[in-house]
Image: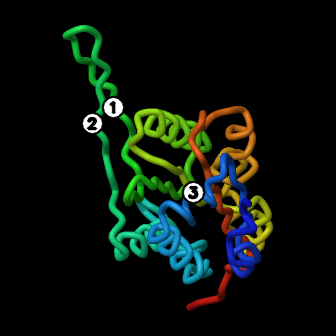
Amino acid sequence: MGIELLPKHITDLYEVHEWRHACAILKNDFPNEWDDILTVLENFRLPKSSIVDGGGRKSKVSNMIDKHFYSLGWEERSFKTQVVIDDNAFDSPTHKVDCYKNKIALEIEWNNKDPFFDRDLNNFRLLFELQAISVGIIITRCDHLQELFNKLGKGSKYGTSTTHMSKLLPRIQGGGGGGCPLLVFGISKELYVEDN
């Protein structure tokens, strides 16, 4: 069992990829978090204004998704980690996770530089090895949205060196997430809506 555990209306709206039985782990071991994820994905739409208007420090798309998860009890989370050798402790800080709840870590990468994927995957790998998380999730954008961005006159804002699916998949297939179960959602043109 894999992504077929997801409702069809989700797989119709998102490009989905899974590694190491992430869907089965979520659905069976973390049913509340699974329901939260499905709720956020079902309710998310990609409004035209979120593409054409400036986003500031964080994109409007990331903010919309974050806020919905936060309203369901998820939180941005940092972890204090150390390596101890004999009596000597060395801090080994991890990057904070966008959305975290009950050992599930979720990152939203809408339009960052693509090395952010390396950071996210390395963070998931380390936190999984330390038993701080059980599944890592990344929400990014599908490659085909570039056509929409170009049509809206914003194509240069979303360049080839920014976060999108074809920049993420080779990193995962190359072992970037280590043994961490991973679930990836690509925001597709099916989610696009015109707004004022």
Give the image quarter of residue 170.
top right
| Secondary structure at numbered mark 3 | helix
Q: Is there a contact, CB below 8 Å, between mark 1 and mark 2?
A: yes
Q: Residue furthest left?
A: 87
| Residue under the point 68% across and 80% down | 192
| Residue under the point 30% across and 31% down | 81
Residue closer to the observer: 111 or 186:
186
- Which amino acid, mark 3? Ile
Q: CA distance from mark 1 to mark 3?
A: 27 Å
- Percent x, y for residue 168? 68, 46
- Percent x, y for residue 105? 46, 53
Q: Is there a contact, CB below 8 Å, between mark 2 and mark 3?
A: no
- Which amino acid, mark 2? Lys
Q: Which residue matches tag 3?
A: 25
Q: Earlier in the sequence, mark 2 or mark 3?
A: 3
| Residue under the point 39% across and 40% down | 95
Q: Which residue matches tag 2?
A: 80
| Secondary structure at numbered mark 2 | loop
